[in-house]
Amino acid sequence: MEDHRCEVILLQTSDVHGCLLPRSYADQSEVCYGLARVASIIKEERRKHKQVLLMDSGDSLQGTPLTYYHARVNSTPAHPVIACMNELGYDAAGIGNHEFNYGLPYLERTMKEARFPWLSANILDTATGQPKFGPPYLIKELPLGLRIGILGLTTSYIPNWERPEHIAGLTFSDPVEAARTWVHHMKKHERADVIVVAYHGGLERDVKTGVPTEPLTGENVGIALCQQVPGIDVLLTGHQHRSLAGYEVNGVCVVQPGYEGRALGKVTLQLANEGDGWKLLHKQSELMGADDYEPDPVIEDKVREVEALTQAWLDQPIGEVDGDLSIHAPAEVRLSEHPLIEWINRVQMDVSGADVSCTALFDNRSSGFGAVITMRDLVTFYVYPNTLKVLRISGRDLREALEQSAQYFTLDDTGAIIVHPAYLAPKPQHYNYDMWEGIEYTLDISRPAGQRVTRLEHNGRPVVDQQAFDVVMNNYRASGGGNFEMFRDKPVVKDIPMDMVELLADYITSHGRITASVNHNWLVVGGHSPAPDLARGSAETRTRAGR
């Protein structure tokens, strides 16, 4: 029998978050990432290699003003992300948690535009118990009879974040159990020679030491997949926005290509068939950075029309400011009260009727609002399609929530207050630090975690554990997102279904002018503030975190 040899290249994107063009929506400056740049790498790899498979691991449809505009303002044009993925000839795409942000009808309509299958073995139709979005896997038969099986999986933690109406009729089963079932099926019944899992989820433990890197909630189970499911050869991960390659876990080649098209994941497989079936001889993963590549003009042309419409919409002025709502140092916003955060909390209280509110500065990108507010300012500042809920919580819950937020900070060796490393890696989580209005409080970062709330008052009186409060917050936090377990399953007093960007835009346009002010109701103490550059941290900490 003739000895056959084969090389297969697996290319992976993940967490593109609608970032197609290499330009910032905040100021139109050139950036070194985006799918248009990644497209140039993909095309180069296809010129170099005969057998190339291209996959995405989810969170492609949400994250930029372009995708917001298409979902909320004008969905008549072809979906820009799908148009680009079709042009690039994706073989398959996974389903991420942010795919559901604009509702199931929008998602299903968008999926129909794709010329590739959407794979998720553990998102089930509750009524039938079967995978909701079609076959959970894809078999690609290559020359010489080599069969590559691609299985899709999605983090099962979505019900803890997403609005219930957006996932009605869906069950999110355990990815590990789903993988056991379907990997065995693909091996036995589909005769798959290689099993690739495209998982919208990440690694819950350090890839080298096995030490947990986060609470083991089930949000990320990549290590468990490698260790508990026999037969997986390659695990393409996402969700955590990590840049990870060159590792194997229990013999499984693992890769994660960052986010926003900053890199392309590449796995090289070397196989041989000596007459007794294909054997995987070697596998190696690497990341190919997008910053060394020029944007592909075909991809840029694909989105030119809807991009122009989006830019015109973004430049619409919607109101004016008395005072200063600009942001110069994001770290300082989180250390001392800022008028833009207070304004967001005040709007939330005004529209909900609640007398207590919390919100976050989600990332370090926004420069706040200038004298004239445009939609560009608003969508750059408020990056998530959240809605609001009013929960009834106790004084004890309130104190626990403040203690949870206080864990965002720690002290360095000089006694400076800095962001705790756990909130910077494996991905920045600035959105998990809340600032409150309607209460008076002090956080002392010099004290041990869990004992940092040294003052907590409401209307000048100490808060007691049994006291009841109606608190307005975004739907992510109300579901317990960000390890705010004290909010989970609390009574919902009011549900405000309007998207926050729409709600804020309506508020601004109805008032015409908004006034910058602070009432100094909270303090962070216990260390000296770092210099602004130290407070902002590394380049990674200055980028927008996905959630």
Image (cartoon, helix red, strand yellow):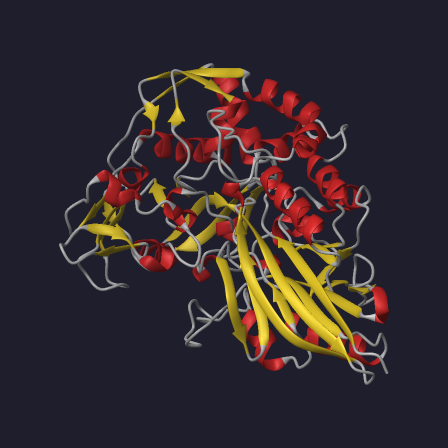
Residue 108 on image: x %, y %: 78, 46
Q: Which of 35/497 is in front?
A: 35
Name the residue rendered at 26%, 44% in the picture.
535
Residue 49 as seen in the image, left or right of residue 316: right
Name the residue rendered at 62%, 63% in the picture.
267
12 in relation to 493, above or below: below
Residue 466 appears anywhere in the view: no
Residue 174 on image: x %, y %: 65, 71
Give the image quarter of residue 34: top right
Name the residue rendered at 49%, 69% in the picture.
204
529 in relation to 234, above or below: above
Screen quadrant of the N terminus: bottom right
Q: Which of 533/420 is in front?
A: 533
Q: Residue furthest bottom?
A: 276
Q: Which of 324/99 is in front?
A: 99
Give the image quarter of residue 40: top right
262 in relation to 479, above or below: above
Residue 253 on image: x %, y %: 58, 70
What is the tally of numbered marks visible in this picture? 0
Residue 266 on image: x %, y %: 60, 58
Name the residue rendered at 46%, 47% in the picture.
545
Residue 460 appears anywhere in the view: yes
